[in-house]
Amino acid sequence: MGAKLAVLISGRGSNMQCIVNACEKGDINAEVCLVASDRADAGGLAWAAQRGIATAVINPKDYQHRDDADKAMAAQIKAHGSTHLLLAGYMRILSEEFVAQFSGRALNIHPSLLPKYKGLNSHARALAAGDQECGATVHFVSAALDSGPAVIQAKVMIEPSDDAETLAAKVLCLEHIIYPKATQWLVTDRLVLEDNKARLDNQLLETPRQYSVA
Ligand code: GRF
């Protein structure tokens, strides 16, 4: 059976689109079986639907308890036969129970050089701190926000002329490269989570793999 990816988004879904395109090109040996969101107005949903991909909206406001929304989302993911889960700009914190169901099979992308700047406004925080570089990290999903074992990072220099917007655009270009790459490692079992540590090609990733353009 081939790998089937469920991708969770909350917005435009440019990373999700890159994943779909990489699957279609054969750069990822998988198909995207579901794009799901907590927001009905997430731009990426329409894009996915146009491509003939199943979509779902689980709005937490429709549920009395936060855990119920997570349960409904997990049920959708399973109903579509997903083998792996990708968080791609999904802006909700998931419950421990939800995360445990996909342990070792779920990745997230975050626009900072983790462990720096978990959470929101990472680009502005890198600028405010006077950092010389920033970037993006793909990591295994764990119950704590943006904290699972890191898999791959890509860096970009911060120029004096950069603001949060220009920086976000530069980092996003890198995200579009490293997320499909890490996903392909995962679905081909080159990347595994063992004892809460990431291993790539049987080597422990003490630090994330560094992507360089050259
Ligand atoms: C990306 O910067 C991602 O790293 C972050 O949210 C943003 C989502 O962008 N988690 P998109 O929806 O994939 O275009």
Image: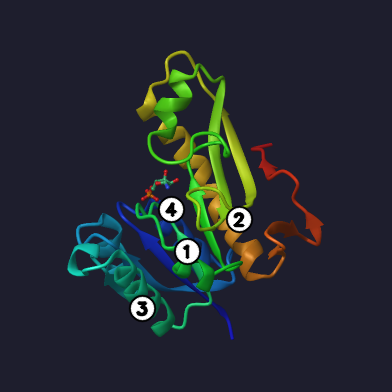
Q: Which mark is residue 76?
A: 3
As drawn, is 83 to the left or to the right of 124? right
In the figure, 122 relative to 192: above or below? above
* Place of residue 42 in the rendered image (x, y in percent of width and height, measured from the top left): 25, 57
The answer to whether mark 3 and mark 1 are in CB contact below 8 A is no
Does the beta carbon of the residue at mark 2 sit less than 8 Å from ligand 1?
no
The residue labelled by disc 4 is: 15
* Dot 3: element: helix
Does the beta carbon of the residue at mark 4 sit less than 8 Å from ligand 1?
yes
Q: Who comes first in sequence, dot 2 or dot 1?
A: 1
The nearer-to-camera label among 3 and 1 is: 1
The nearer-to-camera label among 2 and 1 is: 1
Instruction: Please name the amino acid that badge 2 sits on.
Output: Lys
* Residue lying at 18% horizontally and 68% vertically, measured from the top left: 62
The nearer-to-camera label among 3 and 4 is: 3
Residue 66 occupies which quadrant of the picture?
A: bottom left
The residue labelled by disc 2 is: 181
The answer to whether mark 3 and mark 4 are in CB contact below 8 A is no
Q: Which mark is residue 96?
A: 1
* Separation (CA) of disc 3 from disc 4: 21 Å
> Do we see residue 153 in this rendering?
yes
Q: How many marks?
A: 4
Task: Estimate how packed mark 3 is, as few (under 14), some (14 to 19) or many (20 or more) residues with alpha carbons within 10 Å.
Answer: some
